[in-house]
Amino acid sequence: MVRTTIKALSTAVLVLVAQHGAPHAEPLQSTWKDLRKERPAECLAFLEQYLADPDCARQALMARMIAKRIAQCTSGDSSLDGKTITIAGYAHPFELEFNGVKEFLLIPRMPQACRHPPPPLPDQIISVEFPDGLDINLDPVWVTGILRVRTGKTHLAPFSYFLEATSVAPALIPDVPESG
């Protein structure tokens, strides 16, 4: 009788897993540094020189001229593809709409050396889709969802990641490190 009950329970669990998938693991708490781990070694000096340019206007111009090389050097970390992550950043809407925003870019804190800094490197930008909608303000947020390595470009900036968000919650400014 006990064996029959245990076997029936085991079968029920297998059927549930087959129908609904394995139980979800806790999200991996990620940082912006984690997103740039797979930058090719031959690109490190090139990117460091680009990022160190103190002239913001020249850096923005360079970004347009060397966009292809930057894209090759910042294609994203394939080991994170398909992982459920939580990451803190700033939500930036695609358009001048700030209420009920369902698609936005998530970016790290930007250096304050420029009034209008160039966008972060593509592997430091996540294109986010959040079906519930988000009211965007200047405060940082924690975003949780499934991360995909998927390069793309908006009229604002190119990106290396796409995230299907399941939740967005307020974050504190110290939770968001500076881009790099």
Image (tube, grey):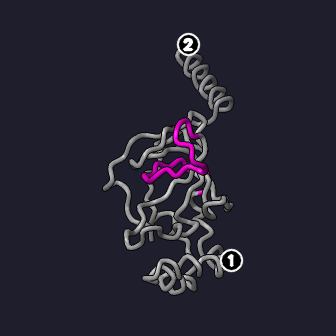
State the image coordinates of residue 45 (x, y, percent, origin top left): 50, 86
Residue 52, disc:
none
Residue 60 spot, x, y in % from top left: 55, 76
Q: Which quadrant of the view contains residue 110? A: bottom left
Residue at 52% over, 70% down: 118
Question: In the displayed structure, would residue 54 be above or below residue 154?
Answer: below
> Can you tell which of label 1 and label 2 is closer to the viewer?
1
**Label 1 sits on residue:** 68
- The residue carrying pointer 2 sits among few (fewer than 14), some (14 to 19) or many (20 or more) residues within 10 Å by Cα, namely few
Q: Is residue 87 on the magenta stretch?
A: yes
Asked if the stretch drawn in magenta spans residue 91, the answer is yes
Residue 86 percent coordinates (x, y): 46, 48
User: Which SS class for mark 2?
Assistant: loop
Which residue is painted at 63% across and 69% down in the image?
75
Q: Quadrant of the N terminus?
A: top right
- Amino acid under label 2? Met
Looking at the rendering, which quadrant does residue 76 occupy? Answer: bottom right
Closer to the camera in the image, 180 or 43: 180
Question: Could you tell me which secondary element the residue under label 1 belongs to?
Answer: helix
Residues rendered magenta in the picture: 81-101
Name the image quarter holding the C terminus.
Answer: bottom left
Residue annotated with mark 2 = 1
Identity of the residue drawn at 68% across and 29% down: 19
Amino acid of disc 1: Lys
